Amino acid sequence: MKQDLLTTTFVLVLAGLGMATASDLPPSKQSSLGLYLSSREAAGFLSAEPSALMIDVRTPEEIDETGIAEDVDALIPLALLNESKGLAFNPDFYSGFLRLVSERNIAIDTPIVLICRSGNRSAQAVNALASLGFTRVYTVTDGFEGDRGKDRRRSVNGWKNAGLPWRKQRASDCAPAIEGGAC
């Protein structure tokens, strides 16, 4: 029993070594909970945690243009494209999330993984959910499309660039955010 505990502790410590820390990230990708996963780590985490929920917080236009991760349970945009202001906070973000939580009986300590384009909005969304009392909300630090390379293309990292499972998706085929955003 003691050996099993030591082995488990050692494996958990080793697993944690690959995870990003706040000091590794620009301020725009840091969250109040400090729970960070790369896209590859997120895929492994979701496989190991069957109760985990994955939410994409990108705009419908981004989903239509680039697709969505196979592991996504819901699309609940944190912001929406507003022609005059650019991105503006989605007034249905909180209500959509709370509806999804209610429908799926999600507890405040259920692991939730948030993904956006490159890790900035998902960190903001973590802060929003933490303000509601949720305690295990992770941000995917490299997002779905990843960071920009020297050529300004999103080719450095990210879910798609890692070759992780994704599909073409029309955002209109997902439930509206106010209805929990299920895809």
Image (cartoon, rainbow, N blue to C red):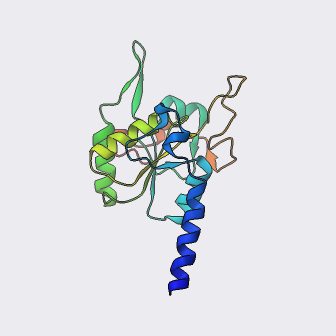
What residue sits 54% from the left and 77% below the top? 6
Q: Position of residue 166 (x, y in %)?
A: 62, 47
Figure quadrant of residue 176? top left
Can residue 59 be spotted in the picture? no
Instruction: Using the image, determine if residue 71 lies above or below residue 12.
Output: above
**Left or right position of 73 against 127:** right
Q: Position of residue 140 (x, y in %)?
A: 52, 45
Can residue 74 be spotted in the picture? yes
What residue sits 34% from the left and 30% below the top? 90
Q: Nearer the viewer, residue 79 or 37?
A: 37
Instruction: Using the image, determine if residue 101 lies above or below residue 124.
Output: below
Instruction: Using the image, determine if residue 86 lies above or below residue 75.
Output: above
Count the marks. 0
Q: Nearer the viewer, residue 160 or 121?
A: 121
Q: Position of residue 138 (x, y in %)?
A: 45, 49
Farthest residue to the right: give it: 151
Instruction: Using the image, determine if residue 116 lies above or below residue 61.
Output: below
Farthest residue to the bottom: give it: 1
Q: Nearer the viewer, residue 6 or 159?
A: 6
